[in-house]
Every structure is written in structure tokens, then in C-alpha cells.
Amino acid sequence: MSAPRRWRLLNSGYQTGAFNMALDQAILESVAAGMVPPTFRLYRWQPATVTLGYGQNAEHSVNLEACREFNYDVVRRCTGGRAVLHDHEVTYALIASESGGDFGCSTLENYRLIAEALQEAFSYFGFFPTLQSGRDRGRAGDLSGQSVCFAVPAQYELVLNGCKMVGSAQRRWQGTFLQHGSIPLELNLAKLSRVLRPGAAADSVTINDRLAQRVGWINRWLAEPTTVDRVETVLQQAIATKFNVQWHVDEPSPDELRRATELQASHYSELNWKGKPALFAQ
């Protein structure tokens, strides 16, 4: 076996949604410039936050009034996909070069490689989710056209008992990619259905029942609930094993923090920033 590769491990704790998204982009830029090695960042949200996919229309995807009622922040990601409610969960960002040997230029292949590491992490808890093949994308019923990320599995996402267990989205830029991942430990389906408006024409009980058939969370299937700390530790171990990594526990560089502060002020503090120029200047 070859010698372990050295990746950065960052654990940022609780941050605002806007700063979390800005810091992920700052790290993406650093990795793309060759300033830092591949980076795996874990973080949390204060307050709980709804993130929109890069291309989503906020008014059509999220109940902004309900977000205000629940004191949820709403921010836009630089990655694609659908809306996600980040509350009692493990959130990660993995940023790496497409030419470093671990990953390639195929978005789906990189999804698959990371999903295999996540499978290993779930096995620590006695779960054995399967990789979604993509053939079942039409089975989400009345939820399939809605904004909620966890309602609709895509290719190379993990499904247990018919329920999607991880929300994932990517951004590719200058030979580098950023993958966002959201692994819920608990979910309040009543709040989820109000905030993300799945099945607007249906009554709330029906919506919640349908969500329960499609959306998974770790503690749903554990006799003794686990913790965010424990899942973060297991996830670190699984990533290290899958990619033959030795972790370098670190903090964001001063340049990354400076750039994140700039991006937070210029873009991520505004919900509709995607119309602004030069966010991903070539």
C-alpha cells in the first residue's frame, strides 16, 4: 500500500450560514490555486439555516415567512441541487483537485467515490444503505417536483428503507470540485414541510406522511440516539480509510478567512447574489 496522503481536516464549529458558504468558496479557491492540500471541513449552523441550490428561485422554493417564524437563516450555496434545512445534522464540505489521483473529471464518479466512504460510515451504526442507481428517480410521487433535497434521490446517493440519507451537491471550478454533504440526525417533518413547501396542493398530514416515506435520518433507526460529535468522528475515519488519508488537523489560513469575510459581505449575505458578476472569475 502506498504511503497515506496528507489532507487538511477543519472543524469550524458553529457559524452563520453566510459565513459557512463564504468559507467553503474561499477554500475552493485556495485548493484550486495549489495553496493548500485537499480539505475536509466539518461545520455547524447558528442559527439553523435553509440553503438554496445555486439555481433555485427563492420565492418558488422556500416559504420565507415560515423561515422568519422559525428564526431560520436562508442563504444560497454555490453548489447546485435543491433546498436543505440544516439543523440537527452533520454537515461537511470536501474540496479536492480533479487531477490529484483520488478523483477525476466526472461529477458522477466523484459522487460515487464519496458515497462509498459514506456507506462505510453508516456501517459503524449498523446501517447498510444502497447506492441509488438513478433508475428510481421517478418514484418520489407527488414530492418529485418540489424543492426539498431529501425527497428525491439522484444517482450515487444513499438510500435506506426507501429513504434518502444524505443530501449532496457539487460545484466544479478550475479543475477542482467542492462537494457539500448534509447528514441529518433528527428531522422535524412538520417544520420541513412548512419551510420547503413540498406538495403545496396537499394537506400537511399527507405531506408529512409522504416525506416520512422518502426522507431518512440517523436516529430514526437507532435504539439509542447518537450525537453529532460521534457521527463526525466516524465520518473522519471513513474518509481517511477510503482515500488512504492522514489528517492534518488545521485551521483556515489567514488568506482564506480574509477572502471568506469579503465573500460574505459581497455575496453570501444576500439571498439573490447569483446575479452578481465575477463570483467565479476565470
Image (spheres, rainbow, N blue to C red):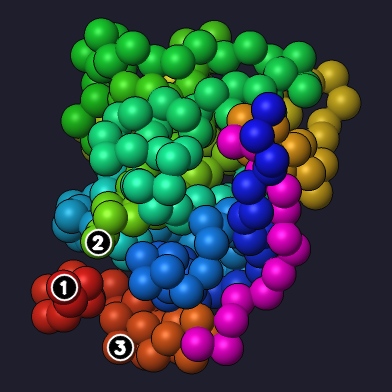
- Residue 220 located left or right of residue 34: right
Q: Which residue occupies 47% across, 74% down?
A: 35
Front residue of 193 and 78: 78
Image height check: is 276 above or below 241? below
User: Which residue lies most toward the right here?
Assistant: 224
Q: Mark 2 vs mark 1: which is more N-terminal?
A: 2
Q: Is residue 96 visible?
A: yes
Viewer-closest of 20 and 101: 101
Three-letter residue code for mark 3: Ser
Q: Is residue 166 magenta?
A: no
Task: State the residue position of label 3.
Answer: 266
Viewer-proximal residue among 110 and 15: 110
Report x, y in % for residue 37.
54, 62
The amino acid on which the numbered mark 2 sits, given as a three-letter code, is Gln
- Among the 4 quarters of the image, the one containing residue 101: top left
Q: Which of labels 3 and 1 is toward the front? A: 1
Q: Position of residue 65 (x, y in %)?
A: 35, 64
Q: Position of residue 129 (x, y in %)?
A: 57, 14
Residue at which label 2 appears: 174
Q: Residue at x 35, y 47 (%)?
A: 99
